[in-house]
Amino acid sequence: MKTLRAKYETKLSKLLENETWTVVEGPAELGEHLDRRCEERKWKACSVGFIFVRLMIELDKFFAESEVSQSDVMMLLCDCLRLFNSRSCQLVLGAAAVQTAGLKSITVKNLCVAAETLGMVAMFASSVMEGMLERVSARPTVQNAMKIVKKDVREHRKEIFTKIATIMSERVHAAGTKITPPTYSKLEANDDGDLVPSSYMKSLVKDTNSLTKVLSNYLDANDRARIMKAVHSSFDKHILAPLQSLDTSAIGRAGHQQVCIDVQYLAEKLKRAEGFGEEYAGRLEHILGEKFGGAV
C-alpha cells in the first residue's frame, strides 16, 4: 500500500507540474467509464485529468481484488483528489505553471480548462468512492474526508471563476476611466474620413467578445452564468454608470456625437455577445435615448 501511494502521488505531482492546461480529446477507451460516472457530461479537460481517471479505474480494480485494508485504499483515493486539487490551485491560480510548464502567462482558456478538469476528476473520483462504499460497511472517517476534499474542489473552482471575472472586470474598469470629457473632445475618424467608435470602445468590445467566446467554448451554461453575473456588475459600475453621469455640457457637439457613436456601437455588439444579448443591450440603448437623444 505504501508503494502504491508513493507511485500515485509521485506520478500525479510530476504530471501536474508539466501540464500546460490545454484541452485534449479523451481517450476512446475511457469513454464508457466517463459516460457512466460523469453522467455523460462532456468535460473539456486536459491530459493530466484523463490520466487521473485511469488511476482511479486502476485503484477501483485494486480495491475489488486486493486483500489490503479497504479503508486505506479509499483514503488513497481521497488523498489523490486532494493532491490534484491543491497542486492545480498552486499551478493555475498561483501561476506556478508559468515556471514549471513554461507557459508565458495563465490565460482565461487555461483557467477554464483547469476548472473543467477539476470538475471532471472530482465527479469521477466521487462516483468511484460511492461504488466502493456500496461494497463495504460504513466508513465515517473516509466519508468525512471525501466530503471535505469535494468541498475544497468546489471552492477552488469558484476561485477560478472569480479570477476569470476579475480579469474581464479589470479591462472594463480601464475602459470606464475613458468615459470623461477629455476623451470626448473631438470626433474619431478612419483614413477615409468616416466617423468610427473610440479606440477604447473598440478594445472593450474585442475583449468582451474574446471572453464570451472562450466561456462558450469551454464552460457549461451554469458556470458561464456565474462569471457573467460578475461581468455584468462590472459593466454596470464602470460603463453604464459613468455614461449616465457624464457631463454633456462639458463635451460639446462633437463629443456628444462621439458618445452616441460609441454607445450605439457597444449596444449593437453586446446584442450578439453570449451572456449579454438584447436585454442588456437595451439598457445601453435606453441611456442613448434618454441622455443623448438617440442613435446617430
Image (spheres, rainbow, N blue to C red):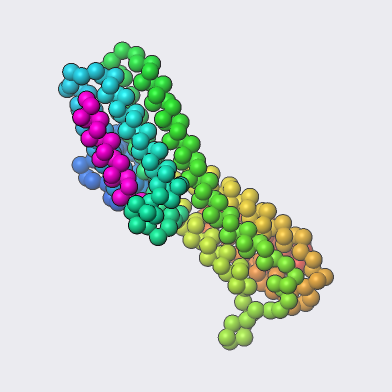
Q: Position of residue 9 (x, y in %)?
A: 28, 35
Question: Which residue is at the front of the view, 226 or 18?
Answer: 18
Q: Quadrant of residue 77?
A: top left
In the image, what residue occupies the spot 20% across and 22% down? Answer: 64
> Where the N terminus falls, by quadrant?
top left
194 left or right of 87 in image = right
Q: Position of residue 34 (x, y in %)?
A: 29, 38
Query: Does the segment drawn in magenta span residue 12?
Result: yes
Res 218 seen here: no
Q: Is residue 220 left or right of residue 294?
A: left
Residue 17: percent from left, percent from top = 32, 47
Q: Which residues are magenta?
A: 1-22
Q: Is residue 203 left or right of residue 118?
A: right
Question: Viewer-proximal residue, 273 or 202?
Answer: 202
Total marks shown come to 0
Residue ID at (73%, 76%): 185
